[in-house]
Image (cartoon, rainbow, N blue to C red):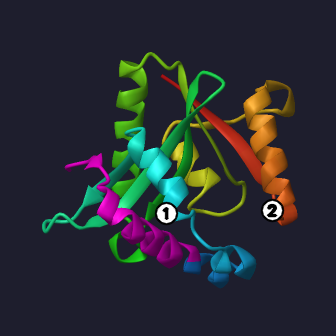
Amino acid sequence: MSIRVAAVGELPVLQDIERAAGRLFREIGMPSVAEDEPLSLEVLAGYQGAGRAWVRPDAEDRPLAYLIAEVVDGNLHLAQVSVHPDAARRGLGRALIDHAAAYARAERFPALTLITFARVPWNAPYYERCGFWSLDEGELTPGLRALRRQEAAQGLDRWPRVCMRRDL
């Protein structure tokens, strides 16, 4: 599977992938998550400019899935992993996570972290299968605590959330 940094012109496609993936939340009773707007082009451009907005394209080089990451407390934090539903269950998300892990190891980050929904099948249970584990409250770093406060302010705490880590 080829994975590469997203081109600036592809950032609207990343938004489209996020909208399509988000619709699945409506089916499990989380309509406000389904209706949530994706990150702005400006924010996505920041990840792209830093070289941490990766895509997994199809045979015609059109993105099917993407992952964006940032540095939080000395770890590579997966800010978003999204796969278009039409391309789900083909290992694209896992390939992107493994790519991020290889990048993190090369950059000497000790771990990957993320925050996700605890009880959504394609969230925390999926990440556990990818080698992540849930952090207890006492294990949260200051940066993860700050991100959780931001999420709470956005109303994401209506459903259980969990911070997760995968050592490298």
Q: Which of the two discs, 1 and 2, sits closer to the camera?
A: 1
Question: What kind of residue is marked 2?
Answer: Gln
**Crowdedness of circle 2 by 10 Å Cα count: few (<14), some, many (20+)?**
few
Image x and y of residue 36, in percent: 66, 74
Q: Which of 14 and 105 is in front in this view?
A: 14
Residue 100 vertical placement versus 27 (above, below)? above
Q: Tell me which corner region of the image, top left, top right, bottom left or bottom right, holds residue 52.
A: top left
Q: Which residue is drawn at 75% across and 43% down?
A: 147
Image x and y of residue 95, in percent: 33, 47
Q: Residue at x 74, y 32 (%)?
A: 143
**Crowdedness of circle 1 by 10 Å Cα count: few (<14), some, many (20+)?**
some
Q: Residue furthest left?
A: 60
Circle nearer the N terminus (1, 2): 1
Kindly check if marks 1 and 2 are in contact, taking CB atoms under 8 A apart as contact. no
Q: Which residue is drawn at 66% across and 38% down?
A: 164
Label 1: which residue? 41
Q: Which labelled disc corresponds to residue 14?
A: none
Q: Give the range drawn in magenta.
A: 1-22
Q: Residue at x 44, y 16 (%)?
A: 108
Question: Can residue 9 be spotted in the picture?
Answer: yes
| Residue 96 painted magenta | no
Residue 54 vertical placement versus 86 (above, below)? above
Left or right of 93? Residue 138 is right
Question: What kind of residue is marked 1?
Answer: Leu
Q: Which labelled disc corresponds to residue 154?
A: 2
